[in-house]
Image (cartoon, helix red, strand yellow):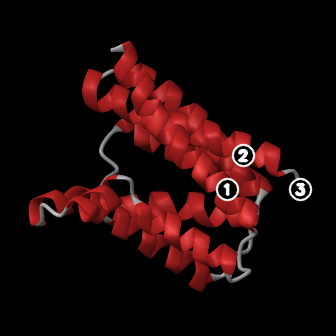
Amino acid sequence: MSYIILAILFLLSGFFMKYSDDLFDEKHDISSASVFGVICGVASGLAAVYSVEAAYIFIAIPIGNFIVMKVDGIHHLITLIIFIAILLISGIPELSLVILLICILAAISDEVGHELIGNITQNKFLNLFFEYRFVMKIVIFLLAVCGVFNIWLFVCFIIFEISYVCGGIVFESLN
């Protein structure tokens, strides 16, 4: 398995996830947000069928977002439909429910913390921790250290996170 291909898919997924969301949230541009959401859905879906380890992440994130009701636009639904279609056509990887649950709980923690922590405390560390959603990063790292995931998956996830932030920076610079 080539982690270079996986890294590119993570990069595309992270960038277009953020760019699509900002287009929808800030510009109310449903059409463009949906197009970029499709790119995100394809990249995420291909990563999930290419790597079982990636499947844990890319399945946990939308489940976590659904649970905390962060699926707030048609672009999210289009992205999710594309992602699910790719998994159904290619075959959903066999996953450990325990590992998937750990990843889902990390995604939920990140989203809840991201939305609420600023209202609860002015602690700069906690605000930064949840602003950049560090729970999932730590969980993926620990799963890699424990041998559940390959350490290169953690590197791919960091690429995803950096490209997600870059998607927001590019959006801000163009608008």
Q: What label sits on residue 155 in the rendered view?
A: 1
The amino acid type of the residue labelled 3 equals: Met
Farthest residue, direction front: 124
- Figure disc tally: 3
The amino acid type of the residue labelled 2 equals: Ala
- Nearer to us in this view, 19 or 163: 163
The amino acid type of the residue labelled 1 equals: Val
Percent from the top left, x then y, of residue 83? Answer: 60, 47
Percent from the top left, x then y, of residue 101? Answer: 51, 79
Label 2 close to label 1 by CB (< 8 Å):
yes
As drawn, is 54 to the left or to the right of 138? right
As drawn, is 62 to the left or to the right of 52? left
The residue under label 2 is 7
Secondary structure, mark 3, is loop
Q: Quadrant of the C terminus?
A: top left
Secondary structure, mark 2, is helix
Secondary structure, mark 1, is helix
Q: Is residue 71 above or below residue 145?
A: above
Q: Which residue is at a point 68% across and 83% down the rendered structure image?
A: 146
As drawn, is 20 to the left or to the right of 6? left
Q: Quadrant of the N terminus?
A: bottom right
Q: Residues within 10 Å of mark 1 (few under 14, many from 20)?
A: some
Q: Which residue is at a point 53% across and 43% down the rendered structure image?
A: 162
The tag earlier along the polypeptide, 2 or 1, is 2
The residue under label 3 is 1
> What is the quadrant of residue 95 in the picture?
bottom right
Q: Which residue is at a point 59% across and 52% down the rendered structure image?
A: 158
Q: Residues within 10 Å of mark 2 (few under 14, many from 20)?
A: many
Q: CA distance from mark 2 to mark 3?
A: 11 Å
